[in-house]
Structures are given as structure tokens and as C-alpha cells.
Amino acid sequence: MSRRLPPLKSVRAFEAAARRGSFNAAAEELFVTPSAISHQVKSLEAFLGVSLFRRARRQVQLTIAGERYLESVSHALDEIDLATRRLLVSASSGAVNISVAPAFLTRWLVPKVREFQNRHPDIELRLSPNNEPIDFAWSDIDMAIYFGDGQWPGVEVFFLREVVWVPVCSPAFVEANPKITKPEELCAHTLIDVSNRPAEWDEFLARFGVTRRKRRKRLSFSSTSLALGAAMENLGIALADRQLVAREVLYGRLVTPLDIAMDNQLGYYLVYQKHRKLTDEMQAFLGWVMEEIAGEKTAAG
């Protein structure tokens, strides 16, 4: 079916005039004369067969029909703008914009970026830390790596790996305190958590039959990186994903004061907008991440 579309130039003139409330202001925005705006609006009104504005001496006011039309036209122009920016930024430049859960970004992805670059030297990864779900319909983000339960609407979801919590602290903290031999003894120390996940320690201890008294010492930080930094500074014991602190444990910056661990229903997932056709660059990143994750699982076991 053929579309009945008005000239885009007339639609842009109408939208600018309606949004700015003035033909003069619209003319300044679009770098044309006020008479050109007036001509384009009249042309659009003739095409539609309705009046879109009530004219006054120095300003214009939308009619009821104009108000209805503006809502749909603004949304359509936003969609065109977003599609254009996506094409210019990603497809033509060989770039992929990726939003990543901060802990996964700094402790897993960044150390491996060079491997991706060596394999795909023509693809630019534009990485940004973020804990919140992305509204892909209104964002220039192409893909994201989320931390959670895998239940997010409107996205294609690829499971990467589960999270296994272990307690960690600095070697100096272990040396300065009595040896911890059972889970309840963890409660005698300052337990460090992440402010948007305050129940993690309680859930962890409950798995081993321990209930923490509410007035016990605790520290809370806004991110996993800050919580682990506090643990490295001898401020207490933090909970961490075992795989994401593997390097710190290997280099002796963190240790596990007690050999216990807990897996849960949360994990890391790669997502992108549902039904979106992947660019070659997006497909390359997806394939590489899944290959790296599969390799780690094979090595572990």
C-alpha cells in the first residue's frame, strides 16, 4: 500500500513553529525566512485540508487538529532522527556503542578489549558504565550487558554466566584479626555491601544458617568497585563475584577469609533491542563475547 505523506520540508516547518510558538523562531531554527515557514505551513494545511494554526500578529496558536497532529509528527521526526544517528554513528563508522554493568566492564571486559581489537582492528568499541536498563528505542546504545535475573521486556537476551558470591578482604585484614573458621564468625567484623543491593549479605549468611543482628557493623558503598576498594584498604569484608575478583586474588590484593561460596539466580546477560537487525560490528562483538565466555567455562571445568 502506498503511503500518503506530506512533504518533509512542510512537516519540519510545522513542527518547529508549533514547538516554538512562532514562525519567526521556527525560521531562525531552520535557517530560512519567516515567509518561507508561513508558505510551508500553508502548503501543509492545503494538503491536509484543515487549519493547523490560529494566527495572531506576532505569534501562532495550535488548533485542536494541530495539537493532535503535532503529537504524532514529533514522534515520527524523533524516530527519523534516531534512525539517522544510529546509521551515521554505528553502521558507517564501524563503531558499536555498548552499555555495561560497571563491575563487569572494569573487571572482565576492559582487560580483554585488546584481544577483541587484535581480532577486529576496524571495529571501534564505545564502552560506557551503567547499572540501569536502556530504553533502546530512544538511545544510541546498540547493545548492553546487564546484571540481573534475565527478565527484561523488549530485548533479545543472551545469558553469559552466573554469579558466585564469595567473601573477600585484604591479606592484612586476615593477619590482624583472629582466624575465621565458620560463617557466623564473619558477623564479628565490618561487612561491606553495595547500597543498591543491601540484602546480599543477609541472603549469603542465611544460606549457611546464620542470621545477622541488625546493629552489627557495616559499610555501604554505591558501587562494587568502591566496596572492593574498601576491602583492599582493610576496612572490612566484602562480597564479590568469584570470577570478577580472580585477578586480585591471584596477585594477592584480596583473599577469601573463609572457603565458602553461594550461587544465586542472578547473572550477566548481553542484550539488545528485540527484533533489531544486527550490524556486522554488533554480530562480531556478540560472537566474540560468547566465545570468550564459553572458553572460560571449558577451562573451569
Image: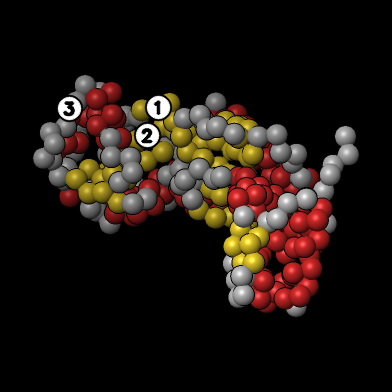
Cα distance between the residues tagged 3 and 1? 18 Å
Sequence order check: which comes first, mark 2 or mark 1? 2
The residue at 41%/32% (across/down) is: 164
Above or below, comparing residue 33 to residue 134 in the picture: below
The residue at 30%/35% (across/down) is: 200
Sequence order check: which comes first, mark 2 or mark 3? 2
Which residue has dot 3 on it? 211
Image quadrant holding the N terminus, namely top right
Q: Which amino acid type is marked by label 1?
A: Asp
The residue at 56%/45% (across/down) is: 135
Which residue has dot 2 on it? 165
Residue 225 appears in the rendering = yes
Say how the picture is coloured. Answer: secondary structure
**Contact between labelled residues 1 and 2, with CB atoms less than 8 Å apart:** yes
Q: For this view, does 99 lie left or right of residue 35?
A: left
Which is more toward the observer, 154 or 67? 67
Secondary element at image label 3: loop
User: Which is in the foreground here, disc 2 or disc 3?
Assistant: 3
Secondary element at image label 2: strand
Residue 201 in percent (x, y) is at 27, 35
The residue at 75%/39% (across/down) is: 277
Cα distance between the residues tagged 2 and 1? 6 Å
Which is more toward the observer, 137 or 72? 72
Secondary element at image label 1: strand
Cα distance between the residues tagged 2 and 3? 17 Å
